[in-house]
Amino acid sequence: MRRSFLAFPAAGAAIAIAALAIPAASSAEDELPRWQQARETGEPVSCIPLSRIRNTRVHDDRTIDFHMNGGEIYRNTLPHRCSGLGFEESFSYETSLSRLCSTDIITVVRTGGGGMSGPSCGLGQFQPIELPERD
């Protein structure tokens, strides 16, 4: 939370003290993490080619960004919460196609679970997004 400081003459000391207690106005975007400020850049697609996935970034139990070769980013918002996904930040999938689709299932990989896998969850549509520039 931002706080503002205002300087006043000695006669206005009471006003200055009161002003310190009031947080400065800030936009909601300033308080959101960068990934939550993403902007949709096109229509969602049902599948993305596996060969173009460069890496993934799990944000929480429902949100995965797929970073593609060429700089594109597709956000997949799962239709339901996938318990442990945000904590583990790791998942696996199996597909017989050369694409990952909204009909596919991911499985949370438990890093400290002695080889035990976590819950399996369905994917949603792949929404092309653009993240704001870093400050």
Image (cartoon, rainbow, N blue to C red):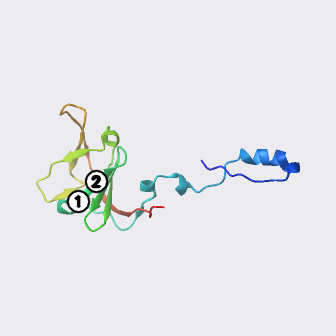
Provide the residue designation for mark 2.
Answer: 56
Give 43 or 71, whichever is nearer the viewer.
71
Q: Which mark is residue 53?
A: 1
Give 103 or 117, whichever is nearer the viewer.
117
Q: Is residue 89 toward the left or the right of residue 16 in the image?
A: left
Q: Report crowding for label 2: few under 14, some 14 to 19, many 20 or more residues within 10 A (C-alpha).
A: some
Are the two marked residues, 1 and 2, in contact with CB atoms closer than 8 angstroms? yes
Residue drawn 45% across the image and 61% down it: 134
Residue drawn 30% across the image and 66% down it: 71
Q: Residue furthest top?
A: 114
Residue drawn 53% across the image and 57% down it: 29
Residue drawn 66% across the image and 52% down it: 24
Tell me the distance, in whole angstroms, between the alpha carbons under discs 1 and 2: 8 Å
Q: Residue furthest front?
A: 10
Q: Is residue 85 toward the left or the right of residue 106 in the image?
A: right
Q: Report crowding for label 1: few under 14, some 14 to 19, many 20 or more residues within 10 A (C-alpha).
A: some
